[in-house]
Image (tube, rainbow, N blue to C red):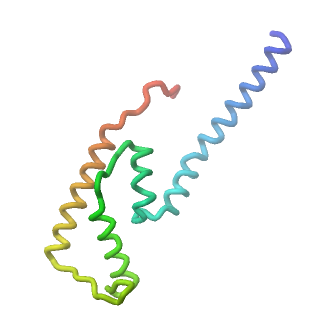
């Protein structure tokens, strides 16, 4: 084996070592990012699901509105910025529950259709 071949092999080995080191920390890096992500920030979450999972939520304007209601209930004692009381009825909660269950089912369907790559070396 010539000096040039040994040099190329050393570069390749160094690159492979770096790839495997990055791979071992990738799970931690992703977990740290996801822990910091606020999942009710739908402006960030919706495109992430589209890009990573190929899942399009479609029109979820209803969810944006209900996330704002939730925020007002939790952080403003059930009032809007303007001081108006948030109206919540049993019926509105049940309707929201139906929509959220349908949304979750659509995400689950997308996730179940994902295929693992067949060309992984391990």
Residue placed at 33% from the left, 75% from the top? 70
Relative to 89, 76 lies left or right = right
Q: Position of residue 25 (x, y in %)?
A: 61, 47
> Residue drawn at (39%, 54%), measured in percent from left and top?
46
Which residue is pictured at 35% across the width and 87% down the height? Answer: 77
As drawn, which residue projects farthest toward the front?
82
Q: How far from the left and from the top, in percent, is residue 89?
A: 17, 79
Percent of width and height locating residue 118: 43, 26
Name the residue: 60% across, 43% down. 24
User: Does 33 appear above or below 90?
Assistant: above
Which residue occupies the foreground of this view, 54 or 1?
54
User: Which residue ends up furthest to the right in the rendered image?
Assistant: 3
Residue at the bottom extreme of this rendering: 83
Residue at the far top: name it.
Answer: 1
As drawn, 81 above or below 20: below
Quadrant in which residue 104 is drawn: bottom left
Residue 64 is drawn in which quadrant? bottom left
Tell me if 110 is positioned left or right of 28 in this view.
left
Depicted 106 relative to depicted 19: above or below = below
Residue 97 in picture, x, y percent from top left = 21, 65
Does residue 120 appear left or right of residue 10 in this picture?
Answer: left
Q: Is residue 94 above or below residue 20?
A: below
Tally of numbered discs: 0
Of the 4 image quadrants, the one containing the N terminus is top right
């Amino acid at each position: 084996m010539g000096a040039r071949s040994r040099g190329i092999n050393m570069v390749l080995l160094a690159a492979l070592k770096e790839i495997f080191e990055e791979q071992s920390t990738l799970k931690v890096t992703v977990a740290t990012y996801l822990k910091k992500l606020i999942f009710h920030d739908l402006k960030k979450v919706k495109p992430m699901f589209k890009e990573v999972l190929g899942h399009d939520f479609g029109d979820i304007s209803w969810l944006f509105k209900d996330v704002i209601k939730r925020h007002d209930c939790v952080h403003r004692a059930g009032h809007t910025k303007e001081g108006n009381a948030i109206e919540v009825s049993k019926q509105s909660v049940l309707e929201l529950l139906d929509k959220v269950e349908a949304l979750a089912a659509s995400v689950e369907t997308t996730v179940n259709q994902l295929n693992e790559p067949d060309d992984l070396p391990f």
